[in-house]
Image (spheres, rainbow, N blue to C red):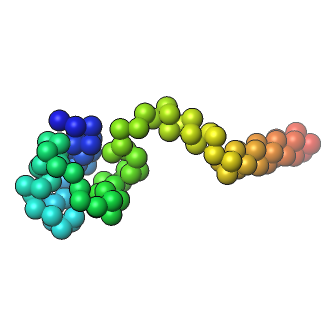
Amino acid sequence: MSLFGDRLRECRENRGITREELATRLGISRNTLGRWERGERWPRSLELVYELANILGVPVLYFSDVDEEKQEEELKKNSVIQDLEERLARLEHSLDEGNTHS
């Protein structure tokens, strides 16, 4: 098995979606989906992975073998994320101060 295949099968089963139903929604054969789940084959395009994630309601990175802690670290380094976190902290601080003066 592969991480991708294991996660795909587990997610599909947890949502009560049959292999045939998911394959139909993706426009692929049930056998192709089975090969993905067994780690014998991979989706032929990133678009299929995006569609798969959308149907199953998970982020695309759910199927990645990237360490989740590492993903979190990278997000914390992102300047846009840092700026948003700082703005949120200032807003929360302002709201807290407003509540203490009431």
Where does the image place residue 85, in percent across and percent down from the top left? 70, 45
Q: Residue at x 12, y 56 (%)?
A: 32
Quadrant location of the C terminus in the rendered image = top right
Residue 102 visible in the snapshot = yes
Left or right for 69, reference 82: left
Quadrant location of the N terminus in the rendered image = top left
Q: Residue at x 49, y 31 (%)?
A: 69
Residue 18 visible in the snapshot = no
Foreground pick, 6 / 94:
6
Compared with residue 35, is residue 69 higher up or lower down, i.e. above or below? above
Foreground pick, 18 / 4:
4
Compared with residue 72, is residue 17 higher up or lower down, i.e. above or below? below
Where does the image place residue 40, in percent across and percent down from the top left? 14, 45
Where does the image place residue 54, in percent across and percent down from the top left? 35, 59
Q: Residue at x 57, y 35 (%)?
A: 73
Where does the image place residue 6, in percent across and percent down from the top left? 22, 38
The single residue placed furthest to the bottom in the displayed view is 27
Compared with residue 26, is residue 5 higher up or lower down, i.e. above or below? above
Number of numbered markers = 0
Left or right for 77, reference 61: right
The single residue placed furthest to the right in the displayed view is 101
Left or right for 91, reference 76: right
The single residue placed furthest to the left in the displayed view is 31
Q: Residue at x 10, y 62 (%)?
A: 29
Left or right for 32, reference 49: left
